[in-house]
Structures are given as C-alpha cells and as structure tokens.
Amino acid sequence: MKQKTVRVGKIVGFFGLKGEAKVNVISDFADERFQVGKSLILKNEGNDIELVIRSVRYHKNQALIAFENYPDLTAVEKLPRNDLMVNVEGLDENEGVHSFEYQGCEVYDTLKQKRGIVLRWEAGSAHGLLRVKTEDREVLIPVVDAFILEKDVKHKRIVVNWMDGL
C-alpha cells in the first residue's frame, strides 16, 4: 500500500564540495521538518528515494541540506531536482494546520454564506494562499489572521473575512 505523503520542499540545485542540496522550503514547520536524522522522500518517476538528513543550514532563503550516503557534490548531483515529501503519518497533530488539510474545505463568509471550496494551498512570497473555487471564478485568499477567522479542517469548514474584490 502506498503511503500518503505531503510536499515540504523542492530540490532546486546543489551547492559546495560537501554535497549540499539547495531546497526551496514550502513548510511552515521547517525547523521540525528538516532536522538531522529525519527522513525525506524524493519523488523520482515512481521510484521514490528515501533520504536521511546529515546536516542542515540556511542560506539566502533556502535550506542547504546534506544527506547520508551522498558524501560530496558529485554524488548529490545525481539526485533529481524534484519534490521532497514526508509521510503524513509522521506529522505532529499539535503543529497546527498542514497545507494539505485545507483542500476540500468549504469556505464561508462572516454571514454564514457559502462562498466556495478550497482547491489547494499555494506558497506565496510572504505567506500561504488558498485557491478557492467560487461559483464563477477562482480567487486567492491569504492565509493570515486578517482573512482566515476560523478554521476547522476536521469538519472541512473555514470562515473568512470576505472582502469585495476577492
């Protein structure tokens, strides 16, 4: 049975003689996700690769991650530039809402009028965004307290501060 995974980053390049992968992080919990000894799954055309983190540091808004069994740049460059995933079963329920949990939630305004359904969570430059399908179009709603007033992903319901122009 295939395990359910969630995307937490993407390898976008390689750095240094020590063989570090440049990773664009798309997790609000980077400090928990990217720790020495933790496992990540690298998507690779059906033959996923399990990677164990050997070291992590941050440079210019990216994580530089070295993996066990990839001792240098020559070895790590053979990895595909692709998505890094973690198993959903390994996620801590106390971390808050994970991006994948928003999908399928019904969106209501403060007057309890249904406005649409969340298609997916997307990474924005400053914060996450919810792509919501309304009756006539798709809109992006910032995942910040000014917009997201209530979130009950267990019951698939979100209340937003709906503003004209969304």
Image (cartoon, rainbow, N blue to C red):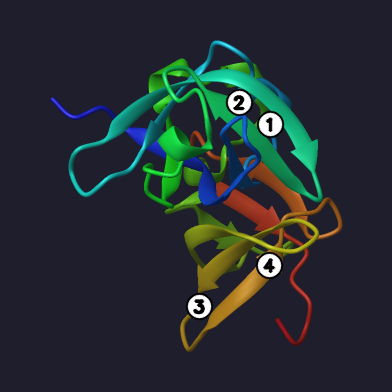
Residue 159, x across and y down, in percent: 67, 54
Residue 134: assigned label: 3
Whether residue 115 is visible here, answered yes or no, is: no
Residue 120 vertical placement versus 35 (above, below): below
Q: Amino acid at mark 3?
A: Thr
Q: Nearer the viewer, residue 135 or 94?
A: 94
Tell me the distance, in whole angstroms, between the alpha carbons under discs 3 and 4: 12 Å
Q: Amino acid at mark 2?
A: Arg
Whether residue 160 is visible here, answered yes or no, is: yes
In the rendered image, which residue does mark 4 sit on?
A: 141
Q: Amino acid at mark 4?
A: Ile
Which element carries disc 1, helix, strand or loop?
loop
Tell me the distance, in whole angstroms, between the alpha carbons under discs 1 and 2: 6 Å
Tell me the distance, in whole angstroms, between the alpha carbons under discs 2 and 4: 25 Å
Which element carries disc 2, helix, strand or loop?
helix
* Marks 1 and 2 close (CB-CB < 8 Å): yes
Closer to the chain start, of discs 3 and 4, is: 3
Mark 3, other Cα within 10 Å: few <14 / some 14–19 / many ≥20: some
Q: Quadrant of the N terminus?
A: top left
Q: Amino acid at mark 1?
A: Phe
In the rendered image, which residue does mark 2 sit on?
A: 33
Closer to the chain start, of discs 1 and 4, is: 1
Residue 104 vertical placement versus 35 (above, below): below
